[in-house]
């Protein structure tokens, strides 16, 4: 979305007029919807509507005389390119959070408006504490201001719901519900109120289509300790699929009645809700009826993170198919970009993105991409979550690395990987950075760690080589990935920030160190991995991704014996699995890319 300065000013003027009518001094506009979805439906893109920022994490504070936009490190460059910085002040979402700004700048008596269905308990409490210290307060909104100011606002989504077969899930919905209900009884909780669509999809063995590339239906759910289930979902989404779903014993309730119904169910009872995702309005309603809140990570989240044998087999199968598609694409890109880089019609980011999709569409079980492909050449690759468009569509040539971060939804799982190609002569700076990224990537694949190790405890292994070179990257090192669910699956992360969820066999993660020089180039290597047992009480990461890693920029003589052995073994496995599946014209590329390191060093 691109807005002119006049459009931004007009939208802010209308929003501020609404604020004045409501007696508000400020308004918080989050990126989130009622489910805290990372990717929202067009109906809920309110932050993008008012600011033009399209990233997946951020929020704005609109005041009468200024507007502030808070985004994290992944989006600092992107935000500066999308947003009118004469209208919005840009702040770091993590390093300069909104509650810190309010705690220093809020004026006594300020009333800051929030939509209680789009602000989590955790954020609400931080904001409330910051404002209280300044004699200001939070004010729940009486209505949605964007219904008033947004002409032509898209309607809420009504995507079709389909079944996830129990044989692919590895467990029936009834068994899952009984397992979670048992957990509620153990903790003395009467009801679990679930607001995360991917948790609900996993529990009921369903998938949805409310938002492209995110196969979960928007809905809410209440699960009782006795196993009773009420599913707050628009019945129009079910269409003719009801007979194929495992919901014969599930009560369907219209979603507009969610808060009132849950407040009644939880009156004078204990309700388990997830403080990191549940809306503040839910807590307020339950407590108003005498209910008690048990605020902890959802037990569904924890159960879903440990994949069943059937789910794990699905990941392995689809990564072979996906690896063949991506390897065909990389071979095609190397040929096309090299042949056309000196012509009047060079290979471009958008053309490459379309061709990658075409290769994936040929693979069995493919449904759709799992996110918009990051096809990024030159300086565009310095933006971690760049998306090519006609106005930025750069040529892929040999002057700078080409980064492609992509993934797919298959019937049996979700994929996510990144490769960086160098099709010309790399500078010394690029070679130093890429070698450090590669060593960081291999460091985690070589790591053996105790069961229960937390992501932040091993994040530095991926950064050490970069730190030694005076470099770093401003994003996490890895995240969980869903089973034909969400690309970024909570709760596990590899990051500098504390993540208190221990890793164990059956978890699915990514490993993705990188380096980004603003205005020049970017690079990243990413594999999806499975946490597997490695002796009594220990684990390691095993690669699911099967795609060659380009070594054109790597300083191979700086790799240790263990790193060489790990890389050679991985490439031998890639060649073995993919040789019969890739297109005939891809095989020479596959063999060259997977040559042993010793052979490469002899040929230098």
Image (cartoon, grey):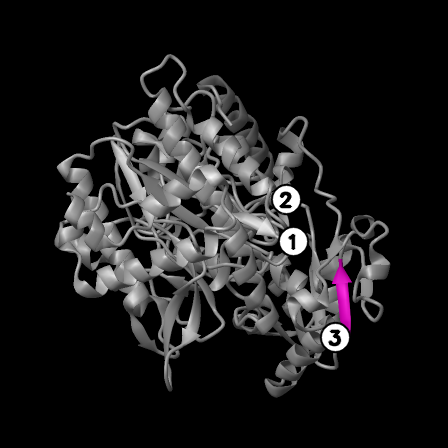
- Report whether residue 216 is seen: yes
Residue at position x 20%, y 54% in the image: 598
User: What separation in Å lies between label 3 and label 2 (alpha carbons)?
Assistant: 26 Å
User: What separation in Å lies between label 1 and label 2 (alpha carbons)?
Assistant: 8 Å
Upstream in the sequence, badge 1 or badge 3? Answer: 3
Residue 229 lies within the magenta run:
yes
In the rendered view, would you say 448 is above or below 415? below
Residue at position x 77%, y 67% in the image: 230
Residue 167 lies within the magenta run:
no
Upstream in the sequence, badge 3 or badge 2? Answer: 3
Find disc 3 in the rendering and name its residue: 174
Q: Which residues are magenta?
A: 228-232
Spot occupied by residue 229 in the image (x, y as percentages of width and height): 76, 71
Task: Quadrant for residue 509, please give it.
Answer: bottom left
Spot occupied by residue 523 in the image (x, y as percentages of width and height): 30, 42
| The disc label shown at residue 216, or none | 1
The residue nearer to you, when weighing 482 against 551, is 551
Dominant secondary structure (helix, strand or loop) of the stretch shown in magenta: strand
Q: Residues within 10 Å of mark 3 (few under 14, many from 20)?
A: some
The residue nearer to you, when weighing 350 against 268, is 350
Task: Quadrant for residue 424, please give it.
Answer: top left
């Amino acid at each position: 979305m691109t807005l002119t300065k006049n459009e931004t000013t007009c939208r802010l003027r209308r929003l501020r007029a609404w604020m004045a009518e409501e007696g508000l001094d400020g308004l918080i506009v989050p990126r989130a919807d009622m489910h805290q979805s990372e990717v929202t439906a067009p109906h809920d893109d309110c932050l993008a509507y008012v600011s033009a920022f399209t990233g997946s994490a951020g929020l704005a504070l609109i005041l009468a005389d200024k507007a502030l936009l808070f985004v994290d490190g992944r989006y600092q460059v992107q935000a500066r390119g999308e947003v009118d910085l004469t209208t919005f002040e840009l702040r770091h979402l993590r390093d300069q959070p909104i509650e810190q700004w309010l705690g220093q700048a809020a004026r006594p008596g300020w009333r800051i408006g929030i939509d209680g269905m789009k602000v989590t308990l955790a954020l609400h409490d931080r904001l409330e504490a910051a404002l209280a210290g300044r004699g200001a307060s939070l004010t729940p909104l009486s209505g949605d201001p964007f219904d008033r100011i947004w002409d032509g606002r898209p309607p809420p989504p009504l995507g079709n719901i389909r079944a996830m077969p129990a044989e692919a899930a590895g467990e029936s919905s009834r068994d899952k519900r009984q397992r979670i209900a048992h957990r509620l009884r153990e903790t003395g909780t009467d009801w679990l109120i679930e607001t995360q669509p991917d948790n609900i999809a996993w529990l009921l063995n369903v998938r949805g289509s409310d938002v492209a590339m995110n196969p979960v239906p928007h809905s809410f759910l209440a699960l009782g300790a006795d196993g009773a289930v009420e599913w707050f979902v628009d019945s129009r989404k079910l269409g003719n699929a009801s007979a194929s779903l495992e919901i014969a014993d599930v009560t369907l309730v219209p979603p507009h009645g969610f808060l009132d119904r849950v407040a009644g169910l939880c009156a004078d009872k204990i309700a388990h809700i997830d403080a990191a995702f549940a809306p503040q309005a839910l807590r307020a309603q339950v407590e108003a009826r005498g209910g008690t809140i048990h605020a902890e990570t959802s037990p569904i989240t924890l159960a879903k993170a440990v994949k069943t044998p059937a789910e794990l087999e699905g990941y392995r199968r689809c990564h072979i198919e996906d690896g063949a598609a991506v390897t065909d694409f990389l071979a095609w890109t190397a040929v096309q970009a090299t042949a056309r880089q000196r012509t009047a019609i060079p290979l471009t980011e958008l053309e490459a993105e379309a061709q990658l999709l075409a290769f994936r569409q040929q693979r069995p079980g493919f449904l759709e991409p799992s996110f918009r492909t990051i096809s990024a050449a030159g300086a565009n690759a310095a933006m971690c979550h760049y998306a090519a468009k006609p106005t930025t569509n750069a040529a892929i040539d040999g002057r700078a690395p080409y980064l492609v971060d992509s993934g797919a939804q298959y019937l049996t799982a979700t994929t996510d990987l990144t490769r960086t190609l160098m099709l010309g002569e790399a500078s010394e700076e690029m070679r130093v950075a890429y070698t450090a990224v590669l060593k960081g990537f291999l460091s985690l694949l070589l790591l053996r760690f105790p069961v229960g190790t937390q992501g932040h405890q091993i994040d530095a292994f991926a950064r050490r080589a970069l730190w030694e070179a005076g470099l770093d990257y401003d994003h996490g090192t890895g995240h969980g990935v869903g089973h034909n669910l969400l690309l970024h699956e909570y709760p596990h992360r590899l990051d500098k920030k504390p993540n208190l969820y221990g890793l164990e066999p059956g978890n699915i993660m990514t490993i993705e160190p990188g380096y980004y020089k603003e205005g020049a180039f970017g690079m990243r290597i990413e594999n999806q991995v499975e946490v597997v047992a490695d002796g009594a009480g220990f684990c390691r990461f095993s690669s699911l991704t099967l795609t060659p890693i380009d070594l054109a920029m790597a300083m191979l003589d700086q790799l240790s014996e263990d790193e060489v052995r790990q890389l050679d073994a991985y490439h031998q496995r890639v060649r073995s699995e993919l040789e019969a599946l890739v297109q005939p014209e891809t095989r020479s590329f596959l063999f060259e890319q997977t040559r042993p390191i010793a052979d490469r060093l002899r040929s230098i």
